[in-house]
Amino acid sequence: MRSKKASLIINPRAGENLTKLADILAILSAAGMKTDIKLKEYGGQTLELATEAAEDNRDLVIAYGGDGTVNQVVNGVMNAKGQHSIVGVIPGGTANVWASEVGIPGDAVKAALALVESQARKVDIGHVDIEGFTLSGEAQNNGSNGDAKALRKIKASSRGRHHFLLMAGLGIDADIMQHVSKPLKYEIGRLAVGLSAAKELPKQHPFPVEIRAANDKGKDDLVWQGEALQVVIGNTRKYASILEMTPGAHIDDGILDVCVITAGDPLTTIQQITSLLLRRKPDNLTAEYFHGAHLSVSVPASIHLQLDGSAVQLKDYLGKSDRKVFKQFDDADQIMVSYSFDAMPRALRVAIPASYNNTLFEHPHGNAASQSEDQTGGQQTASHSEDQSPAQEQAEAGNSGQEHDQPDEWERQQMQARVNKLIEEGRKVTVVGVAHEADKKETYIIAGGTTKKSTGETRPVAVRVNGNTTVLRKTGEAASPSAMQELQEGSEIVVEGKKSKRGVIAAKQIVV
């Protein structure tokens, strides 16, 4: 990925996500990125940090955390004036659904390597806002016109998180996430969510839902009305990394997909939820599906909302004076809130790994970011390049159809002696992974570790190999930089080159 300035925004998760920080910074630095580090210290700060980074014209804003961190970074970038930043992700959360959706490795070091190889792709973003409030039918019969008029005057605030990358949910999931203990979640991961679910599921009950969708004339038609246990508005497919609640969703079609889990009788509620988890997707007997570019969903104000797996507060969308109106009502079920959900077509650029199979893209070849001119321009010829090392010229000549003299025994001995000396004196690196910089010919970054002889301490490094690097095999044969693709995790290479403070080794010679 061709990015010069990056901002790494970290949810530390009690220090857990800081253990691989040196490895990540070495990889990004080896890719030519100047990266600043922003550490989340309090709730909601991630959104602020992302906005600052985007307004500071950072080419790449990286969310290092879970889906909640990703959501806040997306919102921060979208809130920035004149934003053009690409959103990248290094997973470091509980579920990491977005990483699972687009094939980002779960290991932080390998995710950083995948980021180097990624392409910037334009994707749809979901937007949620509050259209308005009304009294429920029962409250209208028992209440006053003054109450109804006060509700109609409430206007949504620009505060709060209004965008989602994955999905929004109304009902059981939001209620569960609302009551998850964050300290416990950092300590025991998904089990904390399970404990919250065990506590909250028996309390769940069906609630009234009304869904409208914009027609061709721009007017809202009623598409469904009834009682439900859960409403999911999907921009993507996976749900909690387990289910596919909206299996037909694409992230570049300008459409949001809706799944409504309909209500059975109270005795079968738990059975429905258990069956849903076992099937890993809803069936036609317990679910209704809809889609549209603009949707209006009305539910009681007591029903919680979640965006990308994180609960959001209704009060965050309201000003102080409007919050006072709500305090007049003892029961939030008396108030119906209408949410608008809109698809924002191709509104955000995100980093997608080059190896991704494009499942989420309806137009897989139509929205890759334009490549730099220097990706195809200025290509070197097979031989006689000023940037090529003698060993590479020998290797490429050996692969061409031209006549050449094979090295004699003396030359082979000299080459083997050179390799042996490098193995003896060079820096030994244990390989973790390899990335190919797609926009630079034959440039590779090898993430790994070196061991300090005096202490036995292993330190992270990132080795940069390009056309100026002499690549040799242990047998004494010359090779090209593309031989880096053969390296396996755990293998050992020997490198000669200067190491920077960030742990980047610019390889002059390398033995593989």
Image (cartoon, grey):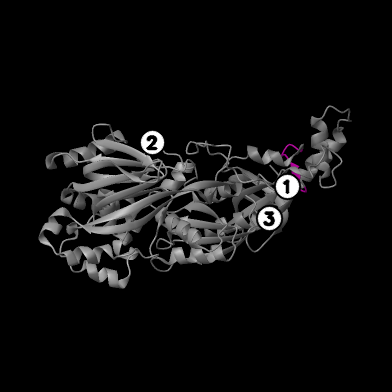
Circle 3: is it few (<14), some (14-19), or many (20+) Cα within 10 Å? many
Closer to the camera, 82 or 151? Answer: 151
In percent of width and height, residue 376 lies at 74, 42
The residue beneath circle 3 is: 505
Residue 113 screen position, x and y as percent: 58, 48
Name above or below for residue 454 compared with residue 245: below
Q: What residue sits right under mark 1 in the picture?
A: 373
Would you identify the image quadrant in which residue 291 lies?
top left
**Circle nearer the N terminus (2, 1):** 2
Q: Nearer the viewer, mark 3 or mark 2?
A: 2
* Residue depicted at 26% across the width and 56% down the height: 337
Seen from the viewer's position, the closer of residues 360 and 405 is: 360
Report whether residue 458 is seen.
no
Residue closest to the eye, 73 or 249: 249
Residue occupied by mark 2 = 247
The prevailing secondary structure element of the residues shown in magenta is: loop
Distance, label 3 to label 2, CA atoms, is 45 Å
- State the separation of the CA atoms marked 2 and 1: 38 Å
Q: Is residue 98 left or right of residue 174?
A: right
Residue at disc 2, secondary structure: loop
Is residue 472 inside the magenta stretch? Answer: yes
Furthest-left residue in view?
142
Mark earlier in primary sequence (1, 3): 1
Range shown magenta = 468-476
Q: Residues within 10 Å of mark 1 (few under 14, many from 20)?
A: few
* Image location (x, y in percent) of residue 275: 24, 36
Q: Amino acid at mark 2?
A: Pro
* The C terminus: image quadrant: top right
Gap between marks 1 and 3 measured at Cα: 27 Å
